[in-house]
Image (cartoon, rainbow, N blue to C red):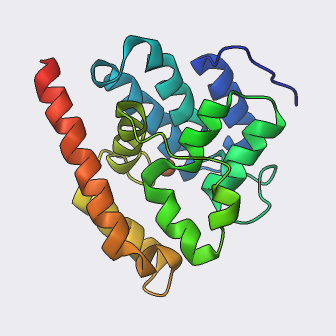
Amino acid sequence: MSSVLLRPTADAARALAHRVIGDLGNRWLHTAAVAARAAQLAAVVPAEDREILVASAWLHDIGYGELARVTGFHPLDGARLLDHHGWPARISRLVANHSGACFVAAVHGLEAEMAAYPDEASATSDALTYADQTVGSRGEPLGIDARIADMLHRHGPGSPNAAVAHLRTPHIRAIADRVRTRLGAAL
Ligand SMILES: [Fe+2]
């Protein structure tokens, strides 16, 4: 697999994602729906970031794929796979930090590894997280609160996600508030 890109494209991102997680059933349905959701959020990111947003959405969960799996922490494993294949650093950073990954990384003891991927904390990173957090695990549309509750149910009360829910949940809600404000302003 070789994909050195000067400029990310959604088509190339979709192709790589399909190669890595296309056989993962619900994970693939979720990914495709997050990419579609990201495309709907074009109005809340700078025009030059729209392709980056959709490409990042296709790639955000590739760390779940067998080809990517090293640490078992999917945002980091996905970012490293992208680095390995020469994708732009910005895409790797967006993938590494989607949906409050930094909080969960701390529970895994992966802060040092994550330091290679600083969070840009931008309208574009907000939109990626918002897209991920408004699509359920089988690709269905879901509200933020239902999505968080479903995630905690699936991962279980003893999971790293549950251990940092008191930090990650308000972080995701704040992102959702910012995106909704931007969507309102874009109307
Ligand atoms: Fe996701």
Picture quadrant of residue 82 = top right
In the image, 45: left or right of 173? right
Quarter of the rendering containing residue 77 = bottom right
Query: Residue 149: image x %, image y %?
Result: 30, 69
**Is residue 28 or residue 68 the one in the foreground?**
68
Left or right of residue 8: residue 171: left
Residue 185 lies, in percent from the top left, at: 12, 23
Q: Residue at x 34, y 32 (%)?
A: 123
Q: Identify the image quadrant of the C terminus.
A: top left
Coordinates of residue 85 in the picture (x, y in percent): 82, 33
Q: Residue at x 31, y 46 (%)?
A: 134
**Residue 2 in view:** yes
Please count the marks in the image.
Answer: 0
Residue 64, visible in the rendered structure: no
Left or right of 95: which side holds 69?
A: right
The residue positioned 40% from the left and 31% from the top of the image is 124
Query: Which sits in the foreground, 63 or 127?
Result: 127
Q: In the image shown, does 59 or 110 lie closer to the viewer?
A: 110
Quadrant where the N terminus sits is top right
Looking at the image, the residue that sits furthest to the right is 1
State the image coordinates of residue 162 (x, y, percent, origin top left): 42, 78
Name the residue rendered at 46%, 19% in the picture: 49
Task: Give the answer, above or below, for where 58 lies relative to 81.
Answer: above
Give the residue at the far bottom of this rendering.
158
